[in-house]
Image (spheres, rainbow, N blue to C red):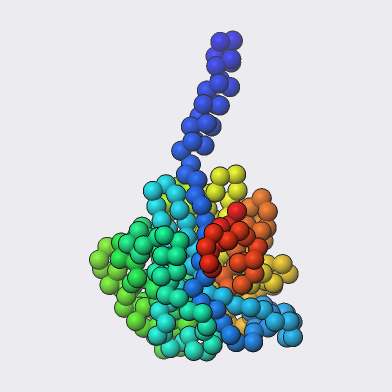
Amino acid sequence: MKKLVLLPILLLAILFTCHAQTPVYHVYALKFAASNYPFTTADWADGGSKTESVKIDFMVWLIRGNGRNILVDAGFLGDIGDAKDFKIIDYVRPDSALLKFGVKPGDITDIIFSHPHWDHIDGVGLFPNAHIWMQKEDFNYFVSTAWQKGQHNGGFAKRDVRAMVNLNLAGKVTLVNGDDQEIIPGIKVFTGSRHTFNSQYVLVQTGTNRVVLASDNIWIYYNLEYLRPASTGGTLDPAGYVKAMQRMKTMVSDVKYIIPGHDARIFTRFPAVADGVVEIK
């Protein structure tokens, strides 16, 4: 009888301990550039309207807590050639965007790369103390197979390949092996969208809520609202892209905590904490 009384108390103690050990993070979106190109939803979502305009921003995401300053993606440097196709305006170098929030480049402890397209990975050299996390299959394709005859390297920049190889040689890269992996306490990554060879998105614990930083695994809100895959070239697996969004919806208490990669409306849906910075809460 005594053991039966003690059992619920023991279980409660275990649950309390586990909860106390789970880090709680704050998550921010930081805009560093915008596009002046007259995009429509059809440019970003299969089946989208060819007349409905959509405003496109470029951003990185900052996760703070547990003694860490973690970036999801690193943005790009202003001299990269592919940027001209987007008619970039309001460009601020990503490390300067962080300074507006009081975070120095050297304060970044980790960078989680969702995928290696130029607008997400080109700024990796701006953060000298960061440890890099990237999907193993995505990394391997990016630095090797993509450059073989008949393969796909659209959106990849050779200088970024060289930078990532050098960082790997320096022991600053951890290659994540597949889906549903907790890479840092309270932070998990998931695959399935195949925006690139094996792109990943990030699930973060923020107190009572969880936030999904989808990056380009969801391009704009239209993709999520209508469960439509990215437009042509935006995914290697349209059905997988949709399934990933459906899965993301099961991970959060409210769909508003699923954050797409390029929709400017992010900066009107959440409270501003600085110019071009909002907290996802």
Rendered position, 45 above or below 245: below
Query: Residue at image x 45%, y 69%?
Result: 97
Name the one closer to the observer, 281 or 144.
281
Say if 137 sits above or below 86 in the image. Answer: above
Q: Is residue 46 left or right of residue 82?
A: right
Position of residue 2 measured from the top left corner of the image (x, y, whole percent): 56, 10
x then y, percent, for residue 185: 44, 47
Residue at (56% x, 70% y) in the render: 261
Name the outermost residue toward the top. 1
- In the picture, the quarter occupied by the N terminus is top right
The image shows a total of numbered marks equal to 0
Residue at 52% x, 23% y is 10
Q: Is residue 269 visible?
A: yes
Tell me if I can see residue 239 in this picture: no
Residue farthest toward the left in the current orientation of the protein: 170
Residue 23, x across and y down, in percent: 47, 44
Name the foreground residue: 198 vs 111: 111
List x then y, in percent, for residue 17.
Answer: 48, 32
What residue lies at 63% left-to-right and 52% top-to-bottom? 252
